[in-house]
Amino acid sequence: MKAQVVAIDGKKGAEVALPAQFAEAYRPDLIRRAFHSERSFTYQPKGNYPMAGRNYTAEYYGRRHAWRQTINTGRSRLPRVKIPGGRSGRVLTVPHATHGTRAHPPKVQKILRERINIKEKNYAIRSAIAATGVKELVVKRGHKFADSTAFPIIIDASLEQLKKAKEAKSALVALGFEADIERCHKARTMRSGRARLRRGGYRTPSSVLIVIGKDSGIWKAARNLPGVDVVSVEKLTVELLCPGGDAGRLTLWTKDAVEKLGSDKLYM
């Protein structure tokens, strides 16, 4: 299986052999499972103070002839504040009392991380890699590109040498991805509520993913383009290849990245 290499100016070049990862079966169920597993590792444990609502002298006396017993007095048998003189005050500490404890508070001991076998994870990454070469899946995600674009998209290694944002944008425009970058720029919206404090306060859709063999300046050149991500081929994740768990992200593979994927047998 071969694919044609495209120069950064849009001209077609020689062909390159695609590694076995691009021929993997499409498994959306496994991709979604691996995606949720990766996302679960970003969760932060949370819980309330163990003594919250319990820092009182309230106590329940069950002995029938004790000073503070409430048996046969028309009052509920609940922990009450101890008042001098053998009397009892208001109910505290129980969940349904004012200033009482929560019934089932969050606990830091809860297991938040969803484990996945390494073979399953690698299978999901290979399936996601193969999905980047299926035009129907890319269109289904809402990406926009030129009609003449052939999948998978293999770009000449000179793309890794770009060092300025205007150079990176010019290359993407020449390759026919200007509409997709503009789509993400217009769809960038501010998060609502307290979520505005997260990740800069904005939500930006995913656009082009550039997979490289070696970073020679392209990461800094493309980092400010809306929705564009740059990642080394050894550090691919399901979350980058399938944002939201949906496969078929518009992905550009440099020639070096494809050759490295096959020679090192990554994710096999």
Image: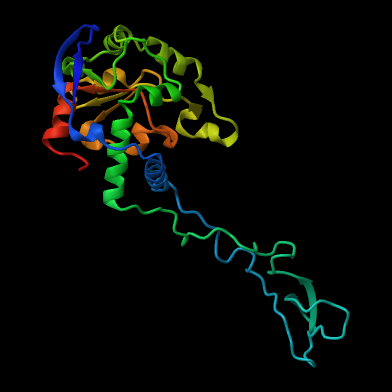
Residue closest to the eye, 49 or 115: 115
Which residue is found at the position 55% from the left and 65% from the top?
A: 50
Q: Quadrant of residue 3?
A: top left
Q: Quadrant of the N terminus?
A: top left
Res. 128 in view? yes
Q: The C terminus is located in which quarter?
A: top left
Residue 206, how many percent across, how many down? Answer: 41, 25
Tell me: residue 172, above or below residue 109. Answer: above
Q: Is residue 222 left or right of residue 12?
A: right
Rendered image coloring scheme: rainbow
Query: How many dots with numbers?
Result: 0
- Location of residue 261 (image quadrant): top left
Residue 36 point in image, percent of width and height: 42, 45
Question: Can residue 214 be seen by looking at this rendering?
Answer: no
Spot occupied by residue 123 in the image (x, y as percentages of width and height) = 28, 43
Q: Residue at x 74, y 87 (%)?
A: 62
Can you tell which quarter of the image residue 7 is in? top left
Q: Nearer the viewer, residue 81 or 184?
A: 184
Q: Is residue 79 left or right of residue 35?
A: right
Residue 40 lies left or right of residue 196; in this view the side is: left
Outermost residue on the left side: it is 263
User: At which x and y percent is residue 189?
Assistant: 53, 22
Look at 70% across and 78% down and name the residue there. 59
Front residue of this view, candidates 175 and 188: 175
Tell me which residue sits at (48%, 34%) in the image.
Answer: 198
Using the image, determine if residue 32 lies above or below residue 75: above
